[in-house]
């Protein structure tokens, strides 16, 4: 009786191990939703700290671990009357395997970038060949800047 039990138990082990491997592969390769950039609110000010209302603002973001090097994504907006602008949370979908592989390949590639990265640029109105310009950036794990200080740029030196 005990010998029959041992033979039956041995027959199920390959099936159990196979199912566990299929489950593990499924978990590694199933695309999951993840945050690239949290919702971001920033105030655009000039060099003197005065808010810049109705200023053109652009947010760029990309996850270098799963997206090839390039221009990434962008969204444009305009500051309100107090110089504030808000951008929603930016999310992506990728498998754990592709994120890990992208991270490792980013370490050994020439560009050396990996992980989420975003920045916000502001461009004021042009007056007499000069314009208020500035930008702030975000790297995953760092705090979000809440103030974008611009400086006066001479466009035609």
Image (spheres, rainbow, N blue to C red):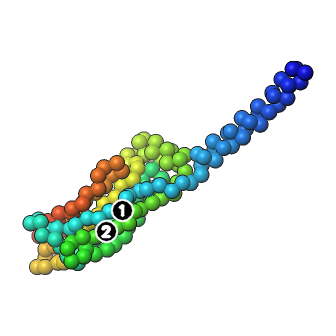
Most foreground residue, 3 or 108: 3
In the image, 36 versus 84, the foreground residue is: 84
Q: Within 10 Å of the Cα at label 1, are there few (<14), some (14-19), or many (20+) other Cα atoms?
A: few
Residue drawn at point x = 48 percent, y = 59 percent: 92
Residue 88, relative to residue 111: is it above or below? below
- Residue 77 percent location from the top left of the image: 31, 74
State whether residue 56 appears in this view: no
Residue farthest toward the left in the current orientation of the protein: 48
Which quarter of the rendering shows the C terminus?
bottom left
Q: How far is the residue under mark 2 from the one under mark 1?
A: 7 Å
In the rendered image, residue 79, in percent from the top left (x then y), is placed at: 25, 74
Quadrant (top left, top right, bottom left, bottom right) of the N terminus: top right
In depth, the one of 59 and 111 nearer the eye is: 59
Regarding residue 96, the answer to whether it shows in the image is: yes
Q: Is 5 above or below relative to 21?
A: above
* Residue 88 badge: none
Q: Are marks 2 and 1 in contact (CB under 8 Å)?
A: yes
- SS of the residue under disc 1: loop
Q: Earlier in the sequence, mark 2 or mark 1?
A: 1
Q: Position of residue 14 (x, y in %)?
A: 77, 33
Residue under label 1: 39
> Residue sitting at 31 percent across and 49 percent down?
142
Helix, strand or loop status at disc 2: strand
Tell me which residue sits at (39%, 53%) in the image: 116
Q: Is residue 123 above or below residue 111?
A: below
Residue 139, horizontal then vertical, whole percent: 33, 52
Going by the image, does 144 lie left or right of 90? left
Say which residue label 2 marks: 86
């Amino acid at each position: 009786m005990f010998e029959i039990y041992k033979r039956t138990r041995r027959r199920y082990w390959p099936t159990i191990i196979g199912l566990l491997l299929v489950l593990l592969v499924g978990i590694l390769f199933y695309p999951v939703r993840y945050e690239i950039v949290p919702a971001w609110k920033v105030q655009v000010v000039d060099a003197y700290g005065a808010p810049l209302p109705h200023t053109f603002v652009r947010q760029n973001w990309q996850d270098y671990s799963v997206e090839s090097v390039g221009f990434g994504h962008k969204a444009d907006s305009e500051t309100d009357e107090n110089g504030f602008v808000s951008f929603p949370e930016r999310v992506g979908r990728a498998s754990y395997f592709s994120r890990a592989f992208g991270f490792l390949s980013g370490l050994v590639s020439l560009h050396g970038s990996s992980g989420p990265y975003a920045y916000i640029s502001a461009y004021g109105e042009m007056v007499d060949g000069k314009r208020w310009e500035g930008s702030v950036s975000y790297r995953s794990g760092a705090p979000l800047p809440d103030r974008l200080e611009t400086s006066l740029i001479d466009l035609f030196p």
